[in-house]
Image: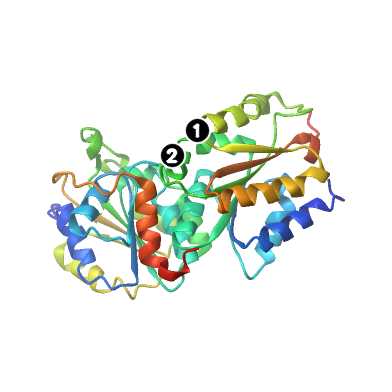
Amino acid sequence: MADATWPEELYALLRKADITQFCYVPDAGHQVLIDRSLADPEVHSVALTTEEEGVALIAGAHLGGKQGVLLMQSSGVGNCVNFFSLIKNGNFPFLTLVSMRGDFGEGNPWQIPMGQATQPVMEDIGITCLRAESPDDLIPTVQAGLTMAFQSEMAIAILLTQKLIGAKAFG
Amino acid sequence: MSKITLQRRDVVGTLLAPRKPNLLVVGGLGSPSWDIAATDDNPQDFCLVGAMGLAVPVGLGLAEARPNNRILVITGDGEMLMGIGSLSTVAHARARNLMIVVLDNEQYGETGGQPTHTAGDTDLVAIAAGSGIRTTATIRTENELNELALSIHEIDGPAFYVVKVTPDLPGAVYPPLDGAFAKDRFRMAVLKDQIT
């Protein structure tokens, strides 16, 4: 993944779509986006102590007329579940990019329960999941997600699967 | 230590009395939201009636989006404890237009008055200061409260205040329960012609 070009294209796409609020819990899968957002004087990029803060931060940004994205790992989705109530009852547009663990080729059994539950849990509470399995379909998938979130006011999670980002070497 | 005499609803009334049009308020579940709704049913208030623990980061997102507004988060001790890590996030983000006031009655009022940890050894002001928020204070008296209210538009944030209040719970006055309505009302008031 270190040599992949899609993270740069992805950052450019998000910025072109006027995303100016980034928030994240540090994660190797999102490293390029995190680094670019921190270096970009036109955006706010906030490190969180836990993922649900990002759900609130994006809602607050929307109240103030700005568009945001939450970058998190699939394990963080579990931390957010009750807080998606804010997004759903408020009908806030919401976009998160989720780097998957416990997915295709995972070698750490501790990651399996939440990784396997990530998509069903999100769908149960009303977040629409779009899976990106390869570099070729990532950009069109995120483009679709941006339109669905910010034009149609949906709550969208783009799942960056381990087929795309690779399974982390472990054990 | 002096006996606690401040009443929560009076405290919110005092804090919001000198309100200028650029002040935006975020209320945390639950009595702080009722206090805000009872004081001033203002479209520039966004009151949470769920998502316990998120009042401060909603305020932070708003503060970053609206640098020319003042953002006041009013929440309770139980709600603050549930999202306590957000104080570190706020300190790190250095939002200068963000101010947090915790109405600390040392109990979970909505669920029957069970003590929170602030009834014991937990000191929220010490936690905020330790998180890196440089402007902090505990407010116990009418005079201290009046002084805070008068400086609400001038304080260099992020700032964090605990106001010790009695456990008395005035009747619930609900803000809009429909979050989508509250959001749209807020955005129409604050963003005016910027809304697309």
Q: Amino acid at mark 2?
A: Ser
**In the rendered image, is residue B187 in sight?**
yes
Extreme bottom residue here? B154
> Residue A6, how many percent across, how many down?
80, 51
Few, some or many residues within 10 Å of mark 2 (<14, 14–19, 20+): some
Q: Is residue A120 above or below residue B162?
A: above
Q: CA distance from mark 2 to mark 1?
A: 8 Å
Q: Who's the residue at 43% across and 62% down the image?
A: B133
Q: Judge by depth and name the residue closer to the eye, B103 or B59.
A: B59
**Residue that carries the numbered disc 2 in the rendered image:** A85
Q: Chain of mark 1?
A: A
Quarter of the image with the N terminus of chain A in it = top right
Residue B118, image quadrant: top left
State the residue at coordinates (15%, 58%).
B10
From this view, report whether residue B174 is shown above or below residue A122: below
Q: Which mark is residue B125?
A: none
Of B178 and B4, nearer the camera is B178
Circle 1 SS class: loop
Going from N to C along the chain, the mark reached first, 2 or 1, is 2
Q: Pointer 2 indicates a residue of which chain?
A: A
Residue positioned most to the right: A3
**The C terminus of chain A lies in quadrant:** top right
Work out whether residue B7 or residue B31 is closer to the camera in this orientation and state it.
B31
Residue B80 in picture, x, y percent from top left: 36, 47
User: Mark 1 sits on what residue?
Assistant: A125
The residue closer to the viewer here, A160 or B16, is A160
Q: Secondary structure at mark 2?
A: helix
Find out whether the residues at labels 2 and 1 contact each other: C-beta distance under 8 Å: yes
